[in-house]
């Protein structure tokens, strides 16, 4: 199944529900709370999809998207 990366500093309850739901369907999902950590993880591991909130704490949104 798919490897998913979520970049989100938001609501932990929503994150936990999303993680349980997607993992129950066979997906691997990881979460980081800022763009810098996301870029490091992306460089180390490949992901099939990246989902990000619109407020990335340590990176300009467009810079982050350009790097991804």
Image: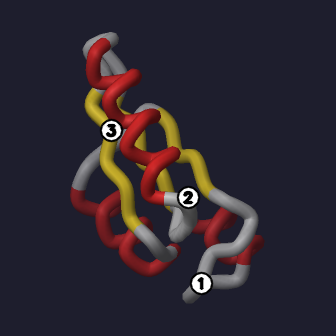
Q: Could you classify mark 1 by the number of other residues whose Cα lies within 10 Å: few (under 14), some (14-19), or many (20 or more)?
A: some
Question: Earlier along the polypeptide chain: callout 2 or callout 3?
Answer: 3
Question: What is the spatial separation of the Cα atoms under label 1 and label 3, in whole angstroms?
Answer: 20 Å
The image position of residue 65, as x and y in percent, is 67, 62
| Picture residue at 31% right of the left edge, 48% below the top | 30
Contact (CB < 8 A) between labels 2 and 3?
no
Instruction: Return the x and y of residue 39 as percentages of the image width and height.
Output: 42, 69
Q: Is residue 33 left or right of residue 64?
A: left
Q: Where does label 1 land, which residue? A: 57
Mark 2 element type = loop
Q: Residue at x 54, y 60 (%)?
A: 11
**24 lies left or right of 32:** left
Q: Where residue 44 appears, x then y in whole percent? A: 23, 60
- As helix, strand or loop, the secondary structure at mark 1 comes to loop
Q: Where is the N terminus found, in terms of image quarters?
A: top left
Question: Which residue in the protein does label 2 denote?
Answer: 68
What whole-number distance in Å separates the C-alpha atoms at marks 2 and 1? 16 Å
In the picture shown, does residue 23 fall above or below 3? Answer: above
- Image quadrant containing the C terminus: bottom right
Question: From mark 2 to mark 3, how far is it between C-alphas?
Answer: 17 Å
Instruction: Confirm or deny contact between disc 1 and disc 3 (CB under 8 A).
Output: no
């Amino acid at each position: 199944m798919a490897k998913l990366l979520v970049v989100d500093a938001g609501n932990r309850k929503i994150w936990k529900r999303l993680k349980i739901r997607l993992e129950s369907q066979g997906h691997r999902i990881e979460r980081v709370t800022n763009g810098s950590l996301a870029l490091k993880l992306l460089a180390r591991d490949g992901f099939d999809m990246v989902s990000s909130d619109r407020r990335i704490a340590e990176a300009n949104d467009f810079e982050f998207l350009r790097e991804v």
